[in-house]
Image (spheres, rainbow, N blue to C red):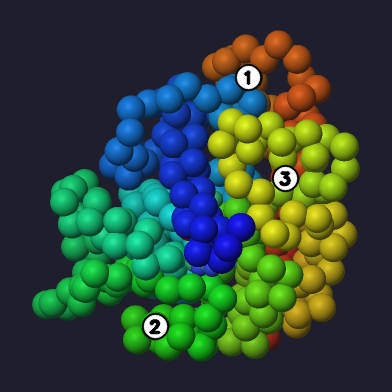
Amino acid sequence: LGTDVFDEAVRSTCDVASHCKRYAVSVGYWKDPYIEHFVSHPKERKAPEISRGYYARVQGVGRLLKAFLEKTKCNCQIINLGAGMDTLFWKLKDENLLPLKYFEVDFPSIVSRKIHYIKSKPPLSKPIMESHSEETVLIDAHSLDTSRYAIVGGDLRDLPKMEEQLKKCHMDPDLPTLLMTECVLIYMTTEHSGDLIKWVANTFRSAMFINYEQVNMLDRFGQIMIENLQNKQCELVGADACRSLETQKERFLKHGWETVNGLDMLKVYQSLPSDEIKRVEALEFLDEKEPFEQLMQHYCLCWAIKDSQNLGLADITL
Ligand code: SAM
């Protein structure tokens, strides 16, 4: 695929994620009153395995994130890279857990769509304005900057420009910072994702990097999964799909991080409270457990820490 065609396909993955999340929310896997505002198409049924997988992803990332907010007492910033139509800002606001500032980055065309949704839907714009303390809001087609929420259109492969854009929105390298990439790095080359991971380690004094994505895609099930996903046009498998959990972790250590943890998603799922697992498993019937378990072993959650300010970030676990 040519770069432009590939990038366009990568941008479309953002809709896959929001459709899957909306469906899972409508079945009752978790609560998210905001996701429906970011999905324009009618509801489409998704296989129970997919919804259960998204549930584990949202819970796993959410637990790490809350542990970080607790350690830093919310005196921190969050930067969601390749955020797509993610609704985390609004959910944190509802839970009174907003960081000092929450940033999102995605391709300009995705960002302008998100800004359009925000501008045209009061349930999205009101929370942003409620947390805004200045008189004016800076807004153009590809960026929006308010006191607590900023979104910028850029390319994660052009780091000098992205840094400049984030600094314009008052990103502060001295604040403890949580960076997250959910199904994003996989669409970049090893070199580009490595540069991004290194940039974060070199830029922030204390930081946590949460990465969620596919893993072990070169084994037999991984190959079948790639074929199935592509046939169903369910998900695009990117350039960098060959990592094992070990190489996932190694790239953080290689690029300036002090500690790194990683688990496959089956382990993450099994670590969730048993009453929650019971509730979720009663929502939709699964004929067979094995395909679900295999699917979950092909996704992983890694979190890397750099803690120059000794905030105790290395203690964070699921
Ligand atoms: N993180 C969101 C979530 O979990 O719902 C969206 C995930 S979606 C699978 C991947 C997102 O990464 C898309 O919105 C895509 O546009 C964005 N993305 C991928 N590569 C990017 C790049 N080089 N620059 C900016 N955004 C990128």
Q: Residue at x 58, y 84 (%)?
A: 204
In whole angstroms, how far apart are the C-alphas of marks 1 and 2?
43 Å
Residue 67 horizontal side relative to residue 165, left or right: right
Image label count: 3
Q: Position of residue 188 (x, y in %)?
A: 64, 65
**Residue under circle 1?**
281
| Side (left or right) of 18 relative to 248 | left
- Please name the residue that numbered disc 3 is placed on: 299
C-alpha separation, residue under disc 2 versus residue under disc 3 = 31 Å
Mark 2 surroundings within 10 Å by alpha-carbon count, few (fewer than 14), some (14 through 19), many (20 or more): some
Q: Which mark is residue 165?
A: 2
Query: Mark 2–mark 3 contact, CB under 8 Å?
Result: no
Residues 253 and 82: in front is 82
Q: Give the SS element for disc 2.
A: helix
> Which of 235 and 39 lies nearest the eye of the viewer?
235
| Tag 2: amino acid | Gln
Tell me if residue 185 can be seen: yes
Question: What amino acid is labelled 3 in the image?
Answer: Tyr
Tell me the quadrant of the picture where the N terminus can be found. Answer: bottom right
> Where residue 109 sits in the image (x, y, percent)?
35, 62
Could you tell me which secondary element the residue under label 1 belongs to?
helix
Position of residue 128 in the picture relative to residue 163 (left or right)? left
On the image, the x and y values in percent for residue 218 come to: 84, 47
Estimate the spatial distance between the alpha carbons at disc 3 and disc 1, rounded to whole Å: 19 Å
The quadrant where residue 135 appears: bottom left
